[in-house]
Image (cartoon, grey):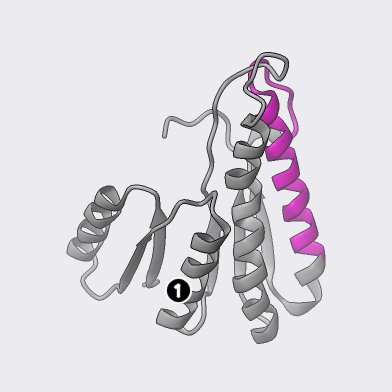
Amino acid sequence: GYHLALCAINETELLSLKEEIQKLYPSVKVYTQAVNCSLKAEVNAFASQSLQNFGFIDVLINNVGVFEPAAILDEADDLLEKHFLVNVNCAYLLYKKIGLSMRKARKGYIFNICSVASIHNIINAGSYCVTKAAMLSLNNIMRAELMDDQVKVTAVLPGSTLT
């Protein structure tokens, strides 16, 4: 019964998902926007448009992520930044916009999809592990900041997932 605001980098797949959802659940409103989640302006625009379309976001699921395997000593110099922009900064930006509206309304739920890499060292995933640990830390800060405002925050730490 929830209406959905969805973003992804691939607009074709996003529109296909929208059609599939609306076919199965005709009463659900689905807003989609192609977003490069490493770009601050695009993430902020998505958050603003989602709030404008729905007025309030009840549940925020921070599920975007990127993983390029490499040992830190062997990886490209910009890989940590690339991982950080998508894996952490996107959730941070959405929190700043949508979390703020939840705090004002004193309700809402944020799910942050972290990873077992948040708490375990994984060979050939150094930068990824660093950013997922940062994501778990961000989750914990969100929870502490919103606890008195009745906004719930939960981290999910799945293992390897084929995406």
Which residue is the site of mark 1? 50
Q: Among all residues in the image, which is located at the extreme left?
A: 23
Q: Is residue 77 above or below residue 1?
A: above
Q: Is residue 148 above or below residue 131?
A: below
Name the residue located 33 percent from the left edge and 47 percent from the top edge.
Answer: 10
Q: Nearer the viewer, residue 80 or 141?
A: 80
Name the residue located 55 percent from the left edge and 31 percent from the top edge.
Answer: 67
Position of the C terminus, as image quadrant, is top left
* Left or right: residue 31 compared with residue 47: left
Where residue 82 sits in the image (x, y, percent)? 60, 38
Where residue 128 sits in the image (x, y, percent)? 65, 31
User: Is 131 inside the magenta-drawn segment?
Assistant: yes
Q: Among all residues in the image, which is located at the extreme front?
A: 77
How packed mark 1 is, by other alpha carbons closer than 10 Å (few <14, some 14-19, many 20 or more), is: many
Name the residue located 31 percent from the left edge and 69 percent from the top edge.
Answer: 30
Tell me the quarter of the picture where residue 79 sits: top right
Callout 1, which amino acid? Answer: Ser
Tell me the quarter of the picture where residue 102 sits: bottom right
* Left or right: residue 56 compared with residue 95: left
Q: Nearer the viewer, residue 151 or 102?
A: 102
Tell me the quarter of the picture where residue 107 sits: bottom right
Position of the N terminus, as image quadrant, is bottom left
* Left or right: residue 88 compared with residue 26: right
User: Is 79 inside the magenta-drawn segment?
Assistant: no
Highlighted range, magenta: 119-144
- Majority secondary structure of magenta residues: helix
Where residue 111 sits in the image (x, y, percent)? 60, 57
- Which element type, helix, strand or loop, lies under badge 1? helix
